[in-house]
Image: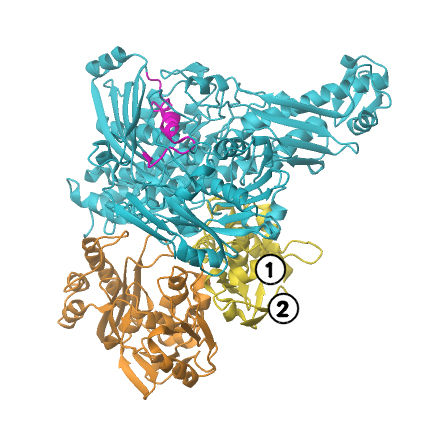
Amino acid sequence: MRVTVTVNGTTESHEVETRMLLVHYLRDVRGLTGTNIGCDTTSCGACTVLLDGESVKSCTVLAAQADGAEITTIEGMAAPDGTYHPIQAAFHEHHALQCGFCTPGMVMAVASFLKEHPHPSEHEVREGLEGNLCRCTGYHNIVQAVLAAAGAEELVR
Amino acid sequence: MIPASFEYRRAGSVQEALGWLAEDPDSTKLLAGGHSLLPLMKLRLASPSVLVDVGRVPGLSYVRDGGDHVAIGALTRHRDLETSQVARAQVPLLAHVAGQVGDPQVRHRGTIGGSLAHGDPASDLPAAVLALDGTMVIDGPHGTREVASSDFFKGFLETALEPEEMLTEIRVRKAPSGWAFQKFNRRAQDWAIVGVAAVVDGDARVALVNMGSTTVRARGVEAALASGASASEAAARAAEGLDPPSDLQGSADYRRHLATVLVRRALEEATATRG
Amino acid sequence: MSAAVMEGAAGVVGTRMRRREDAALLSGEARFVHDLVVPGALHMAVVRSPYAHARITSVDVSAALGMPGVVAAFSGADLAGEWASAMPCVWPVTADMQSPPHFPLAVAEACYAGDAVAVVVAGTLAEAQDAAGAVAVGYEELPAAVDLEDAASDRFLAHGDAPTNRAYTWELVPDPEAVRRAFEDAAVTLRARYVQQRLIPSAMEPRGVCVVPHPFGGEYVVYSATQIPHILRTLLGMTAGIPEGRIRVVAPAVGGGFGSKLDVYAEELLCLALARRLRRPVRWSEERSEAAQATIHGRGQVQEIELAADADGRVRAVRVHLLADMGAYMQLVTPGVPILGAFLYHGVYDVAAYAFTCTGIFTNKTPTDAYRGAGRPEATYAIERAMDALARKLRVDPAELRRRNFIGADRFPYTSVAGLVFDSGNYEAALGAALELVDYDALREEQSKRRTEGATKLLGVGLSCYVEMCGLAPSRVLASLNYMAGGWETATVRMLPTGKVQVVTGASPQGQGHVTSWSMIVADKLGVSPEDVDVLHSDTGVSPVGLDTYGSRSLSVGGTAIALAADRLVEKARLLAAHRLEVAPEDLELSGGEFSVRGSPSSTVGLGALAFEAFSAHDLPEGMEPNLEASATFDPTNFTFPFGTHVAVVEVDTQTGRVDLVRYVAVDDCGNQINPLIVDGQVHGGIAQGVGQALYEGAVYDERGNLMTATFADYLVPAATELPGFTLGRTVTPSPSNPLGVKGIGEAGTIASTPAVVNAVVDALAHLGVEDIEMPLTPERVWRSIAAAAHEPGGDR
């Protein structure tokens, strides 16, 4: 079937298998391999992207369901000149990544979370990340980065 | 993990979806948010030959004040229910429970209709709807029918929905105060080992998550409360007549015990918050 | 900081420099194996045994061959001719160790659920997966040896043709008579049995392999999510019968390992053999539920520990018997994992008599191998749990009991009863710092208040004082342990004509931040900015010699090699500078990347200028070779011995058995720190994994050997919601084992945290009579242990 999807501001149409998952569409058809696959049970959140501005696990969405939607992946977060998005900057500043495999999904989950919770407490940050697993950081620095990014985003506003 | 191949059809209306369902009801599945069905299809535990995507059927995502009840469109996503002003004011239990389903990403996609139609005894929303004395509005080839939530959940992954029918609306009794939800799990993102939804508003309705092959009312608790028992006396009857599962997260005995503790806590909390 | 690092101006070493790795990972630009675009690559899917133990009676691939996109499909028998030898185990711990031959595809007998029995190769992943389901394999199920202790009884044999499940028995009993006497004379003895459940390492990136053949040149490029590109190249060559020089192994971005990618796996060999046979690139991407069975597990031991102590709690002897679950086969270092803990069962305590015995047992389960800490977490768990039990028995505060038994700070270097020389330490200081950070006395007060009030949420405080041996390893010591390779590491430091620097390292990171740390070391040595230092790694075509990354060795061995190579480069540059400035080399001093003449500070030449002169080679001193480049190989003379104290604070709901970890304090001493930011991160992540073992994780098999926890929905890796923030402290006791004075911090958090958390839970419930709860401490297990304990708990259960 044919799907037309806007990814990071660019709209393209492609013929895909009906069973194609959004994550495979992004990686294999659009060539955006920043979005990773970490599990097969919608548990780990490594494949999180924004679908019409909200975080979703792209392993549990069909490409067909994203037809006509706007998707943002990790590749769409930094400014065109390479300037980090405040969340990326906070992750770097607070050493919130080690192997970096969960990071794209984590950053996208945070982007959606901060939109819904602009002034989160530490507890709310932890709850907001319940769907994203990380095996390297113990989450400590990720939580610190999100709290810092919340402050930074406020400054930007 | 990639699902087996299937034919994909996108429905523009309930009638169109019902028409396609009628063509081959046994191997056709409705797809709403996909967060119950797609995980099964990826593991190839489900392989429907036709998927009818109802996700874009207009007019089925709403939370409305219906006077004595609140009506929720079947395609209302958990996140929208969680943040609905109507739901928060009139059925805060339902709004709260919608916020406990899965994780934020799941709540952005999953729908109340999909969750209820899936009939998983470990799901949170069925218990909330049961405790709110809900009614299911079901469309089918022969028109619309209503089924009380207490008659809807039939067994493990089995509901009163016929293969050619579609759940379109859920109506729940208003309960602005006097409610509680207790979810006990090991990790926040996990299914409840046991959950309790309680509403105490004149009469008391208590529904249990994962205490049997389907979501159930704790009838013994309700009867005890009706005859004036205290919360802890009533809670002692939480597992009465139930046959909870044993699995990796807990044995049947442990679930029975948890049910008594969580029901007591839920009743105490619901009573304390009763307006 | 040691002088070796800090020569010259105040540098970056010791600062919290932000990581240079981050940009590629944060932008999505980093390429993991699955991300590589390889034109024409075929996808491999593996057909796995659903039975823990079965005779393979037939394999029929004909239906699969007829499916869309399928290029080839093979049984184990079809590919038997591809292997020059069985898959390698490089650590035969005893001369008589049993090791059943292990081939990438089973031929006659499947020995664990997940054992590979056939492969399908197709144009797309979906086609390969579809066709894998069409391979018909005939099985005759055999009784399975599942439970470790049951397997030790040989009731069922894990391998049909083996006489016993026992693989080996390894002993370390320096003085049996001393141990016997100590137990005879002891005022108090204690005996405990602990179970180390199996863990699934669960690196966030599953494994992946892609082999690109160059059939006409006879070469193979193997991309693999591995920790060990160098070791892998050699062993792939030996097993597949390809000269190792014809194999280039590249580990691109690798998403965590924790030991699980320290192996030579069937799928790496299968992709290689299929690429050779089909003359096309072949790739495989592991799925999570596949990883749970096909990638090694960790731990899996039953431990029996006995202490003999004086009346005042001074421990005189430690005796340990282990049963260690090998799983179905010996993977790369499977048998050696318990041996890495064998020397540490007396922990941080001054013990005079010691006996350790370990028996390795085969079971019909996924092979075990090194998982973060490998042997040392198990040892630390046993002694730290036992010390708490002894403290309870003697009614002594657990902190006080530990103080009475510490190896004193004045005893280093300390020769242990097990024969190690602990390089440096100050255990009392770390304990003191941790107790102060956590406000131990206030916690004890709060604990007793809650008990008195009959609270249903009880408080528990758990200590864990640890020492570990890392920086693997002195090659001679490895030889004495029958390990087949050495423990050195290599490095090259090269100054390019423009003054930019290239570092080539034999270490191979999976998220540890080597590029940042290595460039910091070199930046200070050469007086350049870390940004001007490129670190080349993880590609045997670029870094041909190395021993890779595991065992908290990269900094203390690999980092030292880099420092030594940089020193050599400086010495060559000094000769060139002396030639240029017409002074004696010893009259030059180096500061900020510039040589200046002592007493004549205006007479200078920079390393960058010297690099160009060495490159142009127009005017070099007699006999000097062109270019500024130096290499070094460092073979340590000893392990390093990081140590510290961790304190866990838990709340236990006595009505439900739920445990909440509410606070966590860690004071670690890893010697000098190159980058404390990275050290913190290693500690955080290590703690989380150790907490996972204590409270959440465990591979569960049913009686027939089916893995019940094969997905992330059933195998509970803790999320942010399950963990508190961590409070870190640090003491610094440099290691004399290497010139950087560094130790290692990759495993310490995991080693320390598991016993701290379990001790805390038992501490919360001790007054009720609870002595032990098996890991993971699920709410049900906690609730049952309360119910089973002698006394009734407080509260309204």
| Quarter-of-image position of residue C359 | top left
- Quadrant containing the N terminus of chain B is bottom left
Q: Position of residue A153 (x, y in %)?
A: 60, 58
Query: Which colour is chain C painted?
Result: cyan
Q: Position of residue C646 (x, y in %)?
A: 40, 34
Q: Is disc 2 in the same subunit as disc 1?
A: yes
* Kind of residue sitting beneath label 1: Glu
- Disc 1 is placed on an element classified as helix
Question: On the image, numbered disc 2 is attached to which residue?
Answer: A12
C19 relative to C693 in the view: left or right: right
Specify whether residue C256 is in view: no
Whether residue C644 is situated above or below residue C33 in the rendered picture: above
Q: Foreground residue, C710 or C140?
A: C140
The outermost residue toward the bottom is B143
For numbered disc 2, what is the local secondary structure?
strand
Residue C435: x, y in percent? Answer: 40, 32
Label 2 CA crowd tier, 10 Å (few <14, some 14–19, many 20+): few
Q: Which residue is mark 1?
A: A154
Q: Which chain is orange?
A: B
Q: Which residues are magenta?
A: C326-351
> Tell me, what hue is chain A?
yellow
| CA distance separating discs 2 and 1 | 34 Å
